[in-house]
Amino acid sequence: MLFSLLTVLFYSASSLGDKFISAKLDCNAREFSLLVSLSTAVFLALMLPFLGWRFSFTLMSGLALLVLIACKIVEFYTSAALLKTVSAYELKAWLSLNVIVSYLADLIRHTQTFFIAFIPCAVVLTGGIAMIVFGGKNKRPLFYILYSLLYIASKFLYGLQMNLLPEDTSPVSTLLMVMVGVALLQLPLLRLKPFFKKKGLALGALTRIPNAAGLWTEAVAAQQNLLLYSLVQPMQLAILFATALIRREKLGKLKLVGSILTLAAVIAMTVLIYIHKGAL
């Protein structure tokens, strides 16, 4: 649970950086992916001497790397597109659906037990998310829904693959190779000279410091428990919701009620899972 809480803190600090890179720097999906992956790789490399290198190159680990790289590319491309029109708050709301998906995945893997109260909790959670995401105005609803579903799918599959890695594999070692892989794949796809002339790239890169730390703690949480990994985003949503209330942002009645329902459903579901399993 500690690593999940640390991830929430680190990601909350860096979430505005994603919005800054996508909207303020006006980076397209390829530019966003290169800047985020390359700068994150640098900061992960600085962590490596303290955390050590542990990764065995086998056919299975190679395939796992390919899956993780693919998931990160989908995540970066969809978030870069979405953050041009939606807030980080709405994006985190979508990820609350992965609490349901992770629980169902654990049921299939026989690591959780089913309880009937899960169904009304899932209905309330889904309804709350729908109220948040549709509380705003979206000019291209089909694009918005498709990209959001791809985004949450990439996050879930990334966490699932991390959970399946051998326990003696270092998350930092894995993440460093994933980020380098993502960056190398972007290089042939964009014009480097106009990209590096953008003002504010250094500031955008600096926002990856807490992100790199968050990626490490997130990977550790995913390796330990898939459900705890999925709870990171709803907890982050709670922080963003509290921040919005403190800053007196105009959420609108639909988003306000939706946020309360989403957070209440996640809390209820987490408590019930804890009771039925005995411990997280």
Image (tube, rainbow, N blue to C red):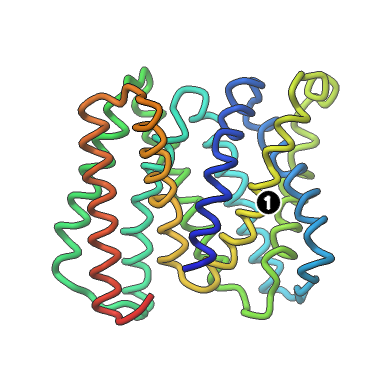
Provide residue 187's location: percent of width, then percent of height: 80, 36
Q: Is residue 160 above or below residue 185?
A: below
Q: Is residue 97 above or below residue 5?
A: above
The residue lying toward the viewer, choosing from 51 and 61, is: 51
Which residue is outermost to the front? Answer: 246
Provide residue 260's location: percent of width, then percent of height: 24, 43
Residue, x 14% and y 57% (percent of image)? 120
**Which image quarter: residue 162?**
bottom right
Question: For mark 1, does the 10 Å Cα neighbourhood hold few (<14), some (14 to 19), or many (20 or more) residues?
Answer: many
Provide residue 32's location: percent of width, then percent of height: 66, 33
Provide residue 47's location: percent of width, then percent of height: 78, 59
Disc 1 residue type?
Ala
The residue lying toward the viewer, choosing from 181 and 205, is: 205
**Which image quarter: residue 91?**
top left
Residue, x 50% and y 62% (percent of image)? 4
The residue lying toward the viewer, choosing from 73 and 59, is: 73
Q: How many marks?
A: 1
Q: Is residue 176 above or below residue 77?
A: below
Q: Secondary structure at mark 1?
A: helix
Q: Quadrant of the C terminus?
A: bottom left
The residue lying toward the viewer, choosing from 65 and 251, is: 251
Position of residue 179 in the picture relative to residue 252 (left or right): right
- Residue, disc 1: 212
Position of residue 257 in the picture relative to residue 163 (left or right): left
